[in-house]
Image (cartoon, rainbow, N blue to C red):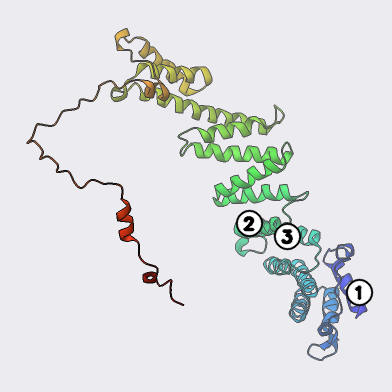
Amino acid sequence: MRNAFALMGAGLLAVGCGPGAWAAVQPAAEAAWSAPAGRFKSESLAAQAARLEGEGSFKAAARVYRRMAAAATSPSNRAFALVRQADCHFAAEQFHASWQAYDAALKETRARLSYAHILGRLRLLASGFLRGEGAFLGMRNVGQAIDVYERILEVAPSGPQASADRLLLAGLYAERGDLEDAKILYREVIKRNPGSPDSMQARIAIGKLLVQDLQRSDADGQLAREARSHLSAVEVAEASEAAGQISVLLRQTSEALATRLYNLGEFYTRQAHYRPAAARRYLADVKRQYPDTQAAVKAAELLVSLENLPVEAEDEPVRTLAEKLAEPPAVSRVVVPPEPGPEPEPVKPGPQWRAPSAGDLRKWLLPLEDLGLGED
């Protein structure tokens, strides 16, 4: 039995897994693995798997390891056989089968696994799915890569590579169209690793997504302000490509915020809502806060037309809600008295209440025998 597991260690080297990665998870004795098996009953399952790996027959070795996983009686042994099966599938370039076997091994929660080895292989598998390796016509499988990275972050939510894993998964979410999920992951990267290179990349990426949202709707300007906050916090070299991207994105956010103010000013120049003072205030804010935008040019032109208005056309100053509530009503309410009708009939006095007398109290008192208290 010991020699069979030694051959397994040699098989680990054949598929690129160093012996140190599995030093803490060597399987215990398993009777079903050491018993003769196969067509001629000449080799045990463990011996067959080791021999096939040594010969480079990884597909056949993976089938034997699958039988060993089914025959295992402990979670650790089952997980060990599943990982060895996954390694053989990986070596045979059967990437989908490899991913399924690794995923099954990770579900053995009570098993002792070398997570560093498994997570490294899973990252390679995800990259292969994105390149279309092992797929029909070499098509990229974004959904499969997302499943792999979700499993990676479920197993290792923290660690030296967790931030990079979140960045990659957020990018895949955005590629698939799950923009809200991508924003959540980008914000988590920024929160967990503020000031790191990964957080800088996350700020640029979420800034791009928010700027895309501006073109659909941003009634209160919240998206544009959040985008400016993220993009302004990015520290990059002035001559770098990222600096150029950030500059373009910041101009787009400024244009969106300026257009919002301009639309408010233009709204108060319409006949149904005509208030020149409010219009001047919003248009002046556009020129002052966002002078390098197209909205500022249009605001300046509209201000010129408002300045030519006569003084009597001015409206009252804009009052706050508290000032409006404090003002008395413009028109007092007129109460119309009811028309006189027939005189109401006098109400007849009813019986008056009086304090009970001593006789009244004696009248309502009952003897003890009537209460049944005198009986034995």
The amino acid type, in three-letter code, at marker 3 is: Leu
Report the front residue among 355 and 17: 355
For the point 48% across and 19% down, the residue is 285
Residue at left 27%, top 46%? 354
Q: Name the spot of residue 233 as percent of width and height, x first.
A: 66, 31
Kindly state the secondary structure of the residue where label 1 is placed. Answer: helix
> What residue occupies the far bottom of the structure in this picture?
40
Q: Is mark 2 on a helix, strand or loop?
A: helix
Q: In this view, does 129 lie to the left or right of 339?
A: right
Q: Residue at x 55, y 38 (%)?
A: 210
Quarter of the image holding residue 142? Answer: bottom right
Left or right of residue 172: residue 58: right
Residue, disc 3: 122
Mark 1–mark 2 CB contact (< 8 Å): no
Q: Of the residues under marks 2 and 3, which one precedes in the sequence?
A: 3
**Numbered badge on residue 6:** 1
How far apart marks 1 and 2 lie (CA) works out to 36 Å
Is residue 230 toward the left or the right of residue 105 in the image?
left
The amino acid type found where label 1 is placed reads: Ala
What kind of residue is marked 2? Ile
**Earlier-in-chain disc, 1 versus 2:** 1
Callouts 1 and 3 close, C-beta under 8 Å: no
Q: Quadrant of the N terminus?
A: bottom right
